[in-house]
């Protein structure tokens, strides 16, 4: 029997790998004799293992099914999935199990309660990522599509934030403190979905009243969807906090915010279309609510009582004062931006918000410091013997605000402006003075936030409504005058002036509240 060229190649390969006198059969037929292989070409001295080795080497060199690529694919199949993939697979299986197993509320919870360190870590991370979403998205927008398009996105985001506040309706704190569940979670859900529908309707009405073109209206719709979903998700995250699983709420908020940032950035990078990126952001938010936030709350908390229209309606009445104060404050804060939209080009929206972000950092920093201590402050205030200690804490926090504001101002006077110019790809050198004024405004805003929280601790939050109404009236008139006279400078100056007026009025009102409390406690005192 003649030896083919392929047989010669196989013999050479076998000799190179230390196998003597190999041969290959053309038709592959073999006979087993006492554990040996013999077919006329392979001598009986070769074992089955040796023949398998020869054939494997031949196929590898010939690019057959055992080639390096096939081996690599087989190893990838056999490799264990990573932690992220395992988590996603486990969560997906749990969702499918809940869908086909009688509902989410029928499943057993898997995560522990009262994990204080994780609560603090994930809540802080969630709040930080959520707070950084707006700055990061404006930076991405400016770099990819320019200042004008980024300005359109900025004003849509400002409007969307007001829509989110309307959707929240100030219910979160009321819900979390409802430990005895006098109002069912189903009623909280109904209330929030109604608020979300009304808030989204108001947003679309505002877009129509503004006379937005198709591009701006689409940008607004995408952003409004995201912020409404942000507000609706808050009721489910509040449920997790109510069940002493705040860290799960923080995880949900982190995932939603990070997902929105990623989807928006990728969509804008691929399409260079702001409307498409905005709509992608809204769709990503909806997906996070449907696939993560709502199922997580339903799986990890006890089944709720049936919803009640009376309970849901009562929430509108009970939370109206707090909602009014929060909405008015944010409306006052946003009025210069709304006036700018009608008087200046959209790119100035970007400049204003970019200058405001360091100021927002002051507000977030102070919030991280004092908000976890509000319960402790309440307990200190409840003891009349500790009132002096209560006052010292207030003075200390106000002093800290001054220090942080000074540090931020020094940073902006030094490397801050070049860093902003690098991040946005725009020159901010001519806005150095405005940057410092905005930092001062940030310190004032942080002080306002803290003083209002203290007034809330004293259970006199309703007393400040008239102050907000006064400042709202000023915010309607002053920005119109200054922006038309000074442009962007007028917007920053009017914002600082309004915030300074609000702080002064709040401090005066706080002093009056303390006087009334002391007089009620000791009517015969001086």
Image: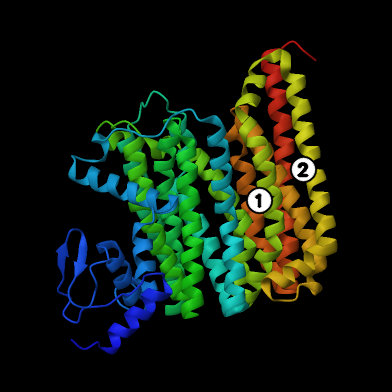
**Looking at the picture, how far across and down is residue 350, in whole percent?**
64, 70
Read off the residue under disc 2.
401
Q: Secondary structure at mark 2?
A: helix
Q: CA distance from mark 1 to mark 2?
A: 22 Å
Query: Depth check: 82 or 127 in front?
Result: 82
**Does 413 appear above or below 312?**
below
Q: Residues within 10 Å of mark 1 (few under 14, many from 20)?
A: some
Query: Depth check: 494 or 165 in front?
Result: 165
Q: Residues within 10 Å of mark 2 (few under 14, many from 20)?
A: many
- Of the numbered discs in the image, which one, if any, rests on residue 471? 1
**Does 3 appear above or below 239?**
below
Coloration mode? rainbow
**Looking at the picture, how far across and down is residue 385, in whole percent?**
72, 13
Task: Answer with left or right where residue 242 lies relative to residue 123.
Answer: left
Nearer mark to the viewer, of 1 and 2: 2
**Looking at the picture, how far across and down is residue 441, in whole percent?**
74, 54
Residue 228 showing in the rendered view: yes
- Dividing the picture into quadrants, the one containing residue 349 is bottom right
Task: Answer with left or right where residue 411 lies relative to residue 347.
Answer: right
């Amino acid at each position: 029997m003649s030896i083919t060229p392929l047989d010669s190649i196989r013999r050479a390969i076998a000799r190179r790998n230390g196998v003597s006198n190999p041969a290959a059969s053309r038709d592959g037929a073999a006979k087993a004799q006492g554990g040996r292989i013999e077919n006329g070409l392979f001598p009986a001295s070769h074992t089955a293992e040796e023949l398998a080795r020869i054939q494997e080497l031949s196929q590898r060199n010939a690019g057959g099914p055992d080639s390096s690529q096939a081996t690599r694919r087989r190893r990838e199949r056999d490799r264990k999935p990573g932690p992220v993939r395992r988590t996603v697979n486990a969560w997906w299986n749990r969702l499918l199990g809940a869908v086909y197993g009688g509902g989410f509320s029928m499943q057993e919870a898997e995560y522990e309660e009262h994990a204080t360190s994780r609560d603090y870590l994930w809540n802080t991370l969630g709040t930080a990522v959520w707070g950084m979403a707006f700055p990061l998205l404006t930076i991405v927008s400016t770099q990819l599509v320019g200042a004008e398009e980024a300005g359109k996105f900025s004003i849509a985001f400002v409007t969307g934030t007001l829509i989110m506040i309307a959707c929240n309706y100030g219910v979160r704190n009321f819900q979390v403190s409802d430990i005895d569940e006098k109002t069912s979670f189903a009623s909280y859900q109904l209330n929030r979905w109604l608020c979300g529908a009304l808030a989204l309707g108001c947003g679309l009405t505002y877009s129509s009243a503004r006379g937005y073109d198709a591009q701006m209206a689409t940008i607004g719709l995408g952003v409004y969807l995201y912020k409404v979903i942000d507000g609706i998700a808050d009721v489910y995250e509040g449920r997790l906090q109510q069940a002493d699983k705040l860290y799960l709420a923080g995880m949900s908020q982190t995932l939603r915010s990070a997902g929105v940032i990623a989807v928006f950035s990728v969509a804008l990078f691929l399409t260079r279309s702001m409307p498409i990126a905005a709509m992608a952001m809204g769709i990503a938010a909806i997906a996070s609510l449907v696939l993560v936030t709502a199922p997580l709350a339903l799986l990890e908390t006890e089944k709720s009582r049936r919803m009640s229209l009376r309970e849901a309606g009562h929430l509108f009445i009970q939370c109206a004062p707090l909602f009014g104060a929060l909405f008015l404050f944010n409306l006052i804060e946003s009025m210069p931006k709304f006036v700018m939209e009608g008087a200046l080009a959209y790119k100035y929206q970007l400049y204003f918000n970019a200058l405001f972000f360091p100021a927002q950092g002051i507000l977030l920093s102070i919030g991280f410091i004092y908000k976890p201590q509000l319960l402790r402050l309440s307990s200190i205030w409840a003891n009349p013997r500790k009132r002096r200690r209560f006052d010292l804490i207030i003075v200390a926090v106000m002093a800290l605000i001054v220090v942080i504001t000074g540090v931020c101002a020094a940073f902006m006077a030094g490397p801050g402006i070049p860093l902003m110019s690098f991040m946005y790809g725009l020159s901010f050198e001519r806005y150095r003075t405005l940057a410092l004024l905005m930092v001062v405004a940030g310190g004032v805003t942080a002080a306002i936030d803290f003083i209002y929280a203290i007034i809330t601790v004293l259970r006199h939050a309703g007393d400040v409504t008239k102050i907000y109404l006064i400042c709202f009236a000023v915010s309607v008139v002053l920005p119109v005058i200054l922006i038309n006279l000074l442009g962007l400078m007028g917007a920053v100056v009017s914002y600082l002036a309004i915030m300074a007026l609000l702080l002064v009025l709040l401090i005066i009102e706080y002093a009056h509240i303390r006087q009334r409390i002391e007089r009620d406690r000791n009517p015969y005192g001086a």
